[in-house]
Structure formats: structure tokens, C-alpha cells
Image (tube, coloured by chain):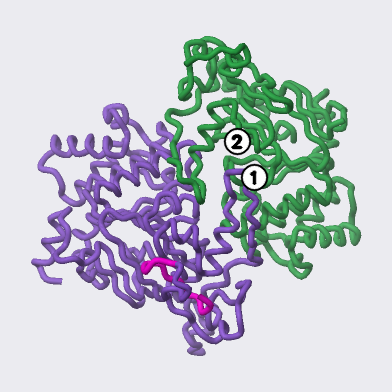
Chain colours: A purple, B green
Amino acid sequence: MSAEQLTAVTEGPTLGSGNAPLLQVTDLDVRFPIPRGIIGTLRMDEKQWVRAVDGVSLHLEAGELVALVGESGCGKTSTAQSIIRMVESFGGTISFQGKDITALSAKAMRPVRRSLQIIYQDPYESLDPRFRVETTIEEPMLVHKIGTDKQDRSRRIDEALTRAGLTPPELYRKRYPHELSGGQRQRVAIAASLVLEPLLLIADEPVSMLDVSVRAGVLNLLDGLRKSGLGILMITHDLSTAAHFADRIAVMYLGRIVEEGPAKEVVRNPQHPYTKALLSVVPKRDPRDHTPAEILQGETPDAARIPTGCRFHPRCPVAEDRCKGEDPALHRPKDGSTSAEHRAACLLV
Amino acid sequence: MSVLEVRDLHVWFDLGEGKQLHAVQGISFALDAGQRFGLVGESGCGKTTSILALMGLLPSTAEVAGEVLLDGKNIMAEAEKTLRPHRWNDIAMVFQGAMNALNPVKRVGEQIVEPMEIHGVASGAAAKKRAGELLELVGIPADRTKRYPHELSGGMRQRAAIAMSLACAPKVLLADEPTTALDVMVQAQILELLVQLSDDLGLVLILVTHDLPAVAQVCPNAAVMYAGEIVEAGTMDELFHDPRHPYTRMLFSATPDLYGESEVRSIAGSPPRLDEAITGCPFAPRCDSRFDRCATDHPALLTVNEGHRAACLLNEVAAKGGSVR
């Protein structure tokens, strides 16, 4: 990446040139080596890998909320971590605002990071207990050299707190994390990202640790930020939340996206047998709704031993012989009942 | 006669310096064999404290009052002395995060044998045989009994924890957030198992959770707790379709639904402190339907329909044919 291209990123919230999506991930491959042990190494055993992410492509536009849904171990968090380059990818490319950031050095990555923020599941763990709220929010500005002086930064702290719904800001600035509720802590974490004026926010299970009564508040906050132009990639295992707040849903299974499309459509007209099963087991609020649950037995197989053919075939209720041999790619289902953006990786649709 | 009846249960925690926290403020309910009952509410509402009181497992700083009738006999009459013979033998519990609380250096099978031997239910080969049967009952293949906890998946460990709670053939099973840390598919498997166990063994099941949809699918009846009190109790159908307490209604609207179109709304504010006396309705400061009396009058839990109880002044007004709007 040239110096000029870098400036474009450094200068903050302006969209990159042309009509490149805000985020474009192509064929992402993330592997973790399995230790072979001394004997295995000496014997020069073949290196074994956990294929956490095995060819994931996704794109996200400004002002869009995309939910990456799946069970634990499906690779959704590894995908998120490699997008912010916390985990190095083995293959594939990640472009942000049309620029390839896959191989940027740590130094070159720093200005990009400002625009690419992540918030975590547990706001009890992600905030420094010794920092007052204002210090937590000021720190990223010091790291990224934002704000002309103390006074300017202070103004930005108030602004970020207000945007995160912690109003009036004076009430929260001097508090320590232990003086805040879970929902308020998550809002502080969001404020600490917003102060950098990011273009993309990755939210890794942002509400799963929070009480039901405050979850909606944090989700509505993210929804509002999306409407103001922020791109949000939400990692979640909660399909109801995804159905409600996301524009698009991508369902992951064993390192692959097996179905993706507009959120409402994926939920109402699922195509992949895995998505169908997953949706059928989500408990419904209405006790009268007794849609039969299709409970898959067993658990997701080990990502070190991905089944041949369609990776879902050993658990698939409708698998046929050919599913054992052929690895399906994402495609538009043949029956024509879906929109063009809705795709599934199943040989039978 | 109900298998389990709780009458006016109170729990206070001693905070020192003469201060007390009134965690459970007089809850009552009665359950028959095979009945599944949900106890729902936000963190800190007293739901876990209530069931720990039934087990007699509260710390020494806690003071408990009220009656717990097991087959009509008050097991709280002389505190620990009368409670102890029933703990695990008649009332058992699956703790929150139980799957992570198994002993890592003991085989799963042995861990189930242990409570049987301690409680004199079975020993030696008979205990081993029963452990194998229990594991099979909860869906763990017999060949896994010799495995260590780390060799089992989260779902399998949770099943093992459930098997362990059933070791002494209890009548009542208390499950505290049994599916919280599990994946959707595994969650569905565990909920299905709990339903099946209560049906097959005639177990009274109390499901403590903040997950309303899980309760809606598993328990025909439930109670909503707020600030240490039951604020509404009835069939799950009534709670969802005809809530008589604004908190119940607001809790449902704060829960996203797969196909729901309505806006998901959080409940502003937070629950009141329980170490100070509360005047008026405890929910009033967060309530969207409060009126003048809510600030001063504490609503009692009154029957609104056969089997449906709610603690909201609006119901009293409505019963008199009045309106506050």
C-alpha cells in the first residue's frame, strides 16, 4: 500500500474511492497448527491443522448490519479476529475500503485499526477496573493521536458517551467499571470505539452477557449507529437477535458460510438443512407456537477432521449419497423462491 | 396434596453493621408431581436465592423464614436438622455452570457413584450399575462412563451433571440456568431431556432462567420475580397472551422473537436496592403504566383469574370497574 492510499484511511470517516464495499473478505482461510510433540516433529509427521475458517467470503457496506451466526467452534470469532488482523490468516484477502489489508505491517495497520473497531462479549472483562470511564475513553485517542488538546478530547468524550446513550455524560465520566451495570459497561466499551470515529464495528456477541431487560437497549444503540452510517459485523449465536436487527445473515458451519441472504428471508425461507434445523430449535416466545423442533444429535465435529464432501452430511437429516463426495459451493437455490442475494451451499437446493 | 409447596418464603442476608438485604420477600407456590415450573426474572431478583433456600445451601449470613412443605411435611421446621435428610434424596439441584464444576481428575461414572454412597442409596457394584443407567437415561452412551470431564463436550458434561443430580432419585429437581452457556442446538437437546425426565420420572421441575422463550417451550406454568417478590404467576400462556403485570409484558417485549415484527424495547432503569425499605410498588420507577397510587401503595399478589395471580394496582382498579387513564 502506498503512502497516498494510507492517508485516505488515516483521514478518518470518508469512504474509500469508487464503489468498493466497506469490507470485502475473499476466500479467508485461518488455520491453527496442532502440536505434533517432540516425537512427531522428529518423525517429521505431516503437519496437522485445525481449519477454523475454510474459505469464507463476505462483504459489508457502510450503514449495513451483517450477522455472522453459528454454534461455538464454527469459526465466526476467528473470522472476526482475522479481519482486524489479531489472528493471521493462512490464505485469502481482506480489503477494507477497497484496500487490501491482509499483509499490512503492524505499523501500517495502525491507522486502519482506527476505522476498524471491535467490542467484545464480556464488558466485565474488557474494561480496565482501575480506569475511570473518561480514562477508558480517552486512552484510544491518545494512542491514535486524536484531539488537539485535553479540552478537545474531553469534548469528544462527552460526545461519545452521549452517542452511546450514557447521558448526561457528567454522570458517568468519573465512575469506575464496578459502579456500572453490565449494560452501561457495554455502552462504555462502545463509546471507547466511537471516539475513534470508526467506519466498521465488529461486535462479538455484544449482548450475550447482559440481562434481558437491557439487551434490547444495547442492540437498539447498535441499530441507531448503523442507521447513522456505521457498518456493523455482529457475531452471534442468537438467531432471534440476528433476525431482528441484521440486514443480512450469514450462517456458518465448520469454517464455512453455508447460507447467506437478507435476514428476514433467511429466517422465513431457509434453504440449507443446517439453517432449517438451527431455526427450528430456537425457542419461541409464544407458548402456543409449537413448531416441531428438528434437534440434530451430537455436536459440531472437530475442525481438525472436516468430513469429506459436504461438511454437514454426517449430521444432515436429508443427506444423499452424493453429499459424501461433492463439496457444495454457495449458489442460488434452483427453485427460484429466493431473491438473488440469497445463497446456500447445499447440493439438494 | 402438592409434592412441593412453598409458603411465604423470606431470605435476608446480613450485611454487617446492622444492615440487611431482603433478597426474597415472601414467595409462595405449590407444585404437583411431574409439573414443570419456570421462575423467571432479571439478575438479582432473588430467583437463585429462592431455590438455594429450598436446598438449604445459603451461606451462614442468610436468615430464612417461611415453610417448605414436601409431601405436606414442613422440612424447614427445624432448619438444617429437618432439611438435611431431604437434600439430594428428595430435592436435588443442577447448578448454574454445573458442567464446569465436575471434578476434573475423576471419571464421570465415579462422580455419580459418590453421592449414592454418601447418601446410602447404593454402593459398590449396585452403585456402579445405577450410575451407568443414569448416564444412559440422560443420553450419555455407556462407554463414556470411564471418561474424564475434559474428554466430554459441554453438552455431554451438562448431561452428566444432570445425571449426578438424579443419583438419589429425587422428587424435585431445581435447575438453575441449565442451558445458559450452551449452543442453541445443545440447548434444545438439554431442554428436551429435562422435559422427558419430568414426564418419565414424575419429577417436579423448577427451571430458573432469564430466558423467557426457553420457559415458554418447557414449562406450562411460571412465576415472574422482581425485587425479591413474585409479581405475576400463572400459566405461561396467560403470562404471554394476557399479562396482568406491566413488568411481565415489558420483559416479553424486551425479548427478540425469530419472527417478531414489533420493536424490541429495553426496560429503562434498574431494579431497586434490596437493602433499603421500598415504599410503594417496587417496579413503579421503571413502569410505563404507573399512576399516583403506585408511589405509595405496595400492591399485593392477588388472584386475577383462577390460577393467575398478579401484584399490580391496575388490577385492583380494573376490578372495581375504574380506570386510571
Q: Give yes or no for contact between labels 2 and 1 (Cβ–Cβ under 8 Å).
A: yes
Q: Residue A81: image x %, image y %?
A: 37, 63
Q: Is residue A341 magenta?
A: yes
Q: Residue B314: image x %, image y %?
A: 56, 18
In terms of secondary structure, where does tag 1 sit? loop
**Direction front: furthest residue:** A336
According to the picture, the residue beneath numbered tag 2 turns out to be B241
Q: Quadrant of residue B92?
A: top right
Q: Quadrant of residue A234?
A: bottom left
- Dot 2 surroundings within 10 Å: few (below 14), some, or many (20 or more)? few
Magenta region: which residues?
A338-349
Q: Residue at x 82, y 24 (%)?
A: B78
Chain under label 1? A
Residue kind at label 1, given as amino acid type:
Arg
Quadrant of the snapshot with the N terminus of chain A = bottom left
Residue kind at label 2, given as amino acid type:
His
Main SS class of the magenta portion in the image: loop
**Direction left: furthest residue:** A4
Q: Left of B142 or right of it: where is B122?
A: right
Q: Residue at x 54, y 29 (%)?
A: B247
- Dot 1 surroundings within 10 Å: few (below 14), some, or many (20 or more)? few
Q: Residue at x 64, y 16 (%)?
A: B300
Q: Is residue A16 visible?
A: yes
Q: Residue A247: image x %, image y %?
A: 37, 55
Q: Left of B11 or right of it: where is A230?
A: left
According to the picture, the residue beneath numbered tag 1 turns out to be A288
Q: Are marks 2 and 1 on the same chain?
A: no
Q: Residue A314: image x %, image y %?
A: 61, 76
In terms of secondary structure, where does tag 2 sit? helix
Q: Residue at x 17, y 39 (%)?
A: A153
